Image: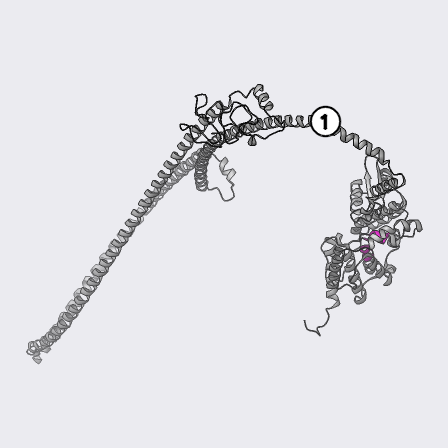
Amino acid sequence: PGVNAPPPKAKIMAAYYEKLTNLFWVSENYLFHAFAWYKYYSLCKEYNRSMSAETRSMQASAVLLAALCIPTSHADIVKNSKTGSKRAVNMSGSDRLAIQSTAEDDIAKEKMARMATLLGFHTREPSREAILSEIWARNIMDDVPQYLRELYIILEETTDPLDMVEKANPLLEKLRAETGVTVDSSSSTTTDDEDDNTLARYVKPLTNVLILKLIFNLSAAYHTISLDHVKKLTSGLGITFEQMEKSIVLSTQSKALSVRIDHRAGCIRFGNPALESDEMRGQLSTLAKRLAATCTVLSPPDVGSILTERAALYQNVRSTLESEHIATLERKVIIEKRKEEAERQVQERLREEERQRKAEELARKAEEGRRLAREQKLREREKLQKIQEEMDAMEKKRYLTAMGRSVENMTAEELREVDTAALAKEHAEKASKKKEEAERKVKEAAKQLDYLVRAVRIEELPRIKEAYEAKVKEDRERYEQEVVEKAKKAKEQWETDVKEKKILNECSVFNYTNQFESKLMAARKIVHEKLCKVEDERAELEAEKGKLVRARKRKQDEERRKKEEEERETREAEEEAERQRQAEIAEQRRLREEEAERKRQAEVARMNEQREREERERQERAQPPPSSSDLDSSKGGSSSGKYIPPSRRGPGTGSSGPSGGSRWGDRAGGFGGGRYEGRSGGDRNDRGTGGPHYSDRGGRDDSGPPPTNSRWN
């Protein structure tokens, strides 16, 4: 639109705000719903001069009720309350919390302001207090019924929680019975549902606002209140305690009110949000620390007694240091032994788990193969069954169609319930009956026709004879008359010819006849020869054209034959290539199957070999552990009494033999520091057979295997 575009008409704007009221009511945005009602009422009152007083009262009531349905905040309740200074002092902390604004609140306010500007409202900060002040400023309360004014006073000015529900309940009941339509009958837009335009729909949100106001008033007057008393106060509203509890929970989300429902004690406990803030939670611990520091300053402890106790403690530690050191070394030895045993058990458990896992994997693969085979057979069986069912259904439909029944509206279940054999038998019986009935009708028709023909012939026989005799008589008379007339005409023609001959003879005409005939025949002969020549030329031309047509046809036939021959050769080549491709695919599949079979056999052989190797290792590990005397000798060989790790022990440390790197005396290996090298004087593979012995670290006999630091070799 241009700069000088005229504003929209009032009727269009009224319809717009009327639709906005329904939109915000459905979305439960009671704030914008109230402002939309206010704008709609203002336009109707200003431009609709024919609006009746009843309609104006209904619309003013809707504006007031829509404003009262806006949920009240704690700040609004405190601002509108008329309590003493004590309540004002108690609520000062909550007021400060309500005044504080965060970044999220600023963003929400900015969004609300933009929405109000777009919708054409008169303020950029829409709120419950703003709409109520506009209602009072525009004297809308003058058009509102008296009972709604009393309801407004109860919700906005009454602070006594004991009788506010009792006073508001009859007013809500009267409002619930209200059925007046809030839209003017002369308006261009009306809704289909009359209940959506009545004042009774505001009862539920007003009840929620009343409950919220009751909770705030109870929190101001009581610290603890029983649930039975609360139920008694709200008994006239017709709501359950679950709805009441939900309203209480929703009222605490703003953190302006602290409420706790104690179902065990059967009461509701109200608290002060300022005392439950984060700043108050560390007050006791801070007080304890500062009191302890104060006590230390007021009564300092005795330093001499503290030093004496500390010296006695140090002396006790020096006296028990050696024994504790020895106990610690022994404990380290035991811990090392336990670690080795635990490690061995872990290795065995891991190998056993690996074996079990592979066995389970093989079993799972085998079971998976069997399952796939079963599923494949099941799918094939289901496919065949489905094909058979489709064929049966087609056959049943054919029978039913032949019998004159409609199969378009029949379901698959109904077709399945039909018996094919019975249907075929019934169809055959009906066909047989139909054939017999047709034959019977033909026989009856033939018999009836025979009777009719016989009767006709009997009846027409005398008439035919009479007609024949009459016709013979008539033909005879006509013949006789024709013969007489023919003879008479012949006689007359003869007499005429005789007269003409006599006249011609008198004129000598017959003397010139031969000459005239010869001239006429000569001229006709010339014309005949000329026509024969033209016909011969035409025949030759036709013959030439026929030769060209036959030659062209022979050429086309030859080209078509060659093309068909090429197509046949191409098709045969493609079929041959397809056969070769199928053969190659079959050969590749066969090679893959053979390769898979070889891999499976190799895997089975590898697993068998691994199982045998694990069995040999298990038998080797079944050797008895070193005796306690060996452990004692190993422990007594240390001259200094200090613990030396096995990896740092030399040939003459910690053992009486020449071997090193292990604390077991029966190990013959002199290298590496591993736990299992060289037991029983030989390698793992020649245990008990007198294998090669190692003379020093890293040294070995020439006949033995090369040294290694592996744990299992």
Any magenta on residue 74?
A: yes
The range drawn in magenta is 62-77
Q: In this view of the protein, which residue sits in the foreground, 119 or 330?
A: 330
Residue farthest toward the bottom in the current orientation of the protein:
507
Q: Is residue 44 above or below residue 384?
A: below
The location of residue 707, given as percent across then percent down, is: 45, 31
> Number of labelled discs?
1
Q: Is residue 376 above or below residue 576?
A: above
* Quarter of the picture holding the N terminus: bottom right
Q: Is residue 196 left or right of residue 623?
A: right
Residue drawn at 39 percent across, 38 percent down: 435
Q: Is residue 632 left or right of residue 698?
A: right
Any magenta on residue 83?
A: no
Q: In this view of the protein, which residue sits in the foreground, 400 or 435?
A: 400
Instruction: Give the residue type that dot 1 points to.
Output: Thr
Query: Would you identify the image quadrant in which residue 280 lies?
Result: top right
SS at mark 1?
loop
Q: In this view of the protein, which residue sits in the foreground, 442 or 578?
A: 578
Query: Would you identify the image quadrant in which residue 652 lies?
Result: top right
The location of residue 138, given as percent across then percent down, is: 85, 63
Q: Is residue 213 above or below residue 536?
A: above
Per the image, the residue denoted by label 1 is 320
Is residue 406 in view from this perspective?
Answer: no
Q: Is residue 12 left or right of residue 625?
A: right
The location of residue 148, given as percent across then percent down, is: 86, 54
Q: Is residue 319 above or below residue 475?
A: above
